């Protein structure tokens, strides 16, 4: 890359870090997003595997679309690794608003509405 363009690109990255990614609302959103993703993964893994077979785990399983756990006609994949990977895929496929809403409902912050 020619020196002038390289300097311009470096300046752009520096300014972006200084003025965009250090902006307080951006930092708050980033940290909140981390908490939501971490909380969803923790809840799913704890309930689905550590508390396997409980009523709550069975209920939680019903919230997960079949595509994440159907393989060769079985409800679960053979290895826990594949199941963990599919839970991570489930969470990563969520939109921001869906992830936030599900997290809030699972934590009891918001209650689901039966009727709209």
Image (cartoon, rainbow, N blue to C red):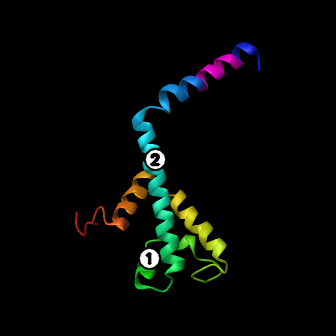
Which residue, as the protein is rendered here, is positioned at the far top? 4
User: Would you name the residue on which mark 1 appears?
Assistant: 62
The local crowd at label 1, few if under 14, some if 14 to 19, many if 20 or more residues have their Cα within 10 Å, is few
* Residue at horizontal 45 percent and vertical 55 percent from the top: 35
Q: Position of residue 57 (x, y in %)?
A: 45, 79
Query: Vertical placement of 66 versus 39: above or below?
Result: below
As rendered, which of 27 and 91 lies closer to the eye? 27
Q: Main secondary structure of the magenta part?
A: helix
As rendered, which of 49 and 68 lies closer to the eye? 49
Q: Position of residue 70 (x, y in %)?
A: 59, 77
Q: How many marks?
A: 2
Magenta run includes residue 8: yes
The local crowd at label 2, few if under 14, some if 14 to 19, many if 20 or more residues have their Cα within 10 Å, is few
Query: Which element carries disc 1, helix, strand or loop?
Result: loop
* Residue at horizontal 56 percent and vertical 71 percent from the top: 67
* Residue at horizontal 36 percent and vertical 65 percent from the top: 107
Which quadrant: the C terminus? bottom left
Q: CA distance from mark 2 to mark 1?
A: 29 Å
Q: Position of residue 77 (x, y in %)?
A: 63, 78
Query: Vertical placement of 97 versus 81: above or below?
Result: above
Query: Which element carries disc 2, helix, strand or loop?
Result: helix
Residues tagged 2 and 1 counted as in contact (Cβ below 8 A): no
Numbered badge on residue 44: none
Which quadrant: the N terminus? top right
Magenta run includes residue 96: no
Which residue, as the protein is rendered here, is positioned at the far left? 115
Numbered badge on residue 31: 2
Magenta part of the chain: 6-13
């Amino acid at each position: 890359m020619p020196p002038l363009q390289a300097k311009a690109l470096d300046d752009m990255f520096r300014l972006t870090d200084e003025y965009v990614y250090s902006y307080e609302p951006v930092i708050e959103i980033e940290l909140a997003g981390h908490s939501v993703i971490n909380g969803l993964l923790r809840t799913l893994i704890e309930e689905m595997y550590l508390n396997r077979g409980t009523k709550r785990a069975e209920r939680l399983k019903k919230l997960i679309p079949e595509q994440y756990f159907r393989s060769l006609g079985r409800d679960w994949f053979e290895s826990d690794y594949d199941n963990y990977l599919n839970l991570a895929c489930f969470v990563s496929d969520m939109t921001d608003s869906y992830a936030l809403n599900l997290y809030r409902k699972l934590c009891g912050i918001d209650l689901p509405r039966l009727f709209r």
